[in-house]
Image (spheres, rainbow, N blue to C red):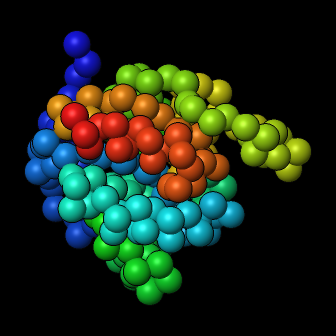
Amino acid sequence: MRTSVYDIAVKTNQGTETTLNQYAGKVLLIVNVASKCGLTPQYEGLQQLYAAKQAQGLEILAFPSNDFLAQEPGSDTEIQEFCSLNYQVSFPLFAKIPVVGAEKHPLYTALTQAIPERIGEGPWWKDLVDYGLTPNEPPEVLWNFEKFLVNKQGEVVARFAPDLTADDPRIVEAIEAELAK
């Protein structure tokens, strides 16, 4: 049996300690985000997905992280303002956390242990290498905008590569399958 992510302590964007228990019974798409990344425009597609599927029980939970080339340098307040002004984000943004390395947040430890391999690992990973970067190997998070799908019981059921956008059929079909359960 898989372990639920609901009891893991997190902080809201306003700094309030909480857990993900408030999302019990919902399908979650958990995404590590950054505002100065080549993938940042994915906020738009994530917001569109949220608007289309929230009423059916989808919650998108964004966890800003500064782990990849310091592409999320802002404060939690600045991140919220950036997302609101530039992408009209209405899904929950949480406090900035580390998602890789020794200081990795317990949520990301649980997510990466539950599903060590990502779906959709494609040529984008090789682009990072071409730029002289050394991407993380599984089970670590590869880069900003990696996505984890969590079912209504709080179990991690899928993991998607950073360059897969919110409208990718693999993501949409997996979400719809979980919403239908």
Residue sitting at x 56%, y 31%? 118
Residue 164 seen anywhere in this rendered image of the structure: yes
Residue 78 seen anywhere in this rendered image of the structure: no
Residue sitting at x 68%, y 63%? 38
Residue reaching furthest to the bottom: 85
How far from the left and from the top, in percent, is residue 74?
Answer: 48, 72
**Quadrant location of residue 112?**
top left
User: Which one is nearer the viewer's eye here, 103 or 62?
Assistant: 62
Task: From the viewer's perspective, tell me whether residue 129 is left or right of residue 15.
Answer: right
How far from the left and from the top, in percent, is residue 57?
Answer: 21, 52
The quarter in which the N terminus is drawn is: top left
The quarter in which the C terminus is drawn is: top left
Residue sitting at x 26%, y 29%? 155
- Residue 171's place in the image compared with 5, above or below, is below
Task: From the viewer's perspective, tell me whether residue 132 is left or right of residue 178.
Answer: right
**Quadrant location of residue 148?**
top left
Task: From the viewer's perspective, tell me whether residue 162 is left or right of residue 48.
Answer: right
User: Which one is nearer the viewer's eye here, 34 or 88?
Assistant: 88
Residue reaching furthest to the front: 180
